[in-house]
């Protein structure tokens, strides 16, 4: 199982998703997992801040490079916190995907 965080458009799980070994995508039902209130609040705040950049093209995104870098740094730390909170689920790896840079920034094998 792979846990991924990316500021996806119209995500009901604030960017968190799971992929199985066949690369089948599933949004996480946040009501059915044991995520701490603190981590959930950080995730929501990060997603809300990042979401305004998700519909921008490369030229527009370039203007907000510093903001996106800061949000990516926050997102990586939040992903680590989520993975620790969900340690009862066996993740093969966790991935952080930067929507602003349009590339995978971090992949952690567990």
Image (cartoon, rainbow, N blue to C red):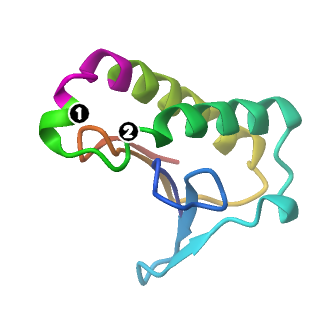
> Mark 2 sits on what residue?
53
The residue located at (54%, 31%) in the rendering is: 49
Q: Secondary structure at mark 1?
A: helix
| Along the line of sight, the residue nearer the viewer: 57 or 73 | 57
> Mark 1 sits on what residue?
61
Q: Is residue 13 above or below residue 103?
A: below
| Along the line of sight, the residue nearer the viewer: 11 or 97 | 11
Quarter of the N terminus within the rendering: bottom right
Q: How many marks?
A: 2
Mark before the other along the chain sequence, 2 or 1: 2
Which SS type dominates the magenta stretch?
helix
Kindly check if marks 2 and 1 are in contact, taking CB atoms under 8 A apart as contact.
yes
Asked whether residue 1 appears in the rendered view, the answer is no
Residue 84 shows which numbered tag? none
**Label 2 Cα crowd, 10 Å radius (few <14 / some 14-19 / many 20+):** some
Q: Is residue 22 above or below residue 13?
A: below
**In which quadrant of the rendered view does residue 33 lie?**
bottom right
Give the residues in magenta: 62-68
Asked whether residue 8 appears in the rendered view, the answer is yes
Q: Is residue 44 above or below residue 20?
A: above
């Amino acid at each position: 199982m792979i846990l991924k965080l990316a500021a996806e458009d119209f995500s009901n799980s604030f960017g968190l998703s799971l992929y199985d070994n066949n690369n089948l995508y599933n949004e996480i039902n946040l009501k059915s997992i044991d995520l701490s209130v603190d981590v959930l609040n950080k995730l929501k705040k990060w997603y809300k801040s990042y979401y305004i950049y998700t519909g921008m093209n490369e030229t527009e995104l370039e203007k907000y490079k510093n903001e996106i870098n800061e949000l990516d740094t926050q997102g990586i730390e939040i992903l680590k916190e989520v993975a620790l909170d969900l340690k009862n689920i066996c993740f093969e790896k966790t991935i952080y995907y930067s929507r602003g840079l349009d590339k995978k920034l971090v992949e952690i094998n567990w």
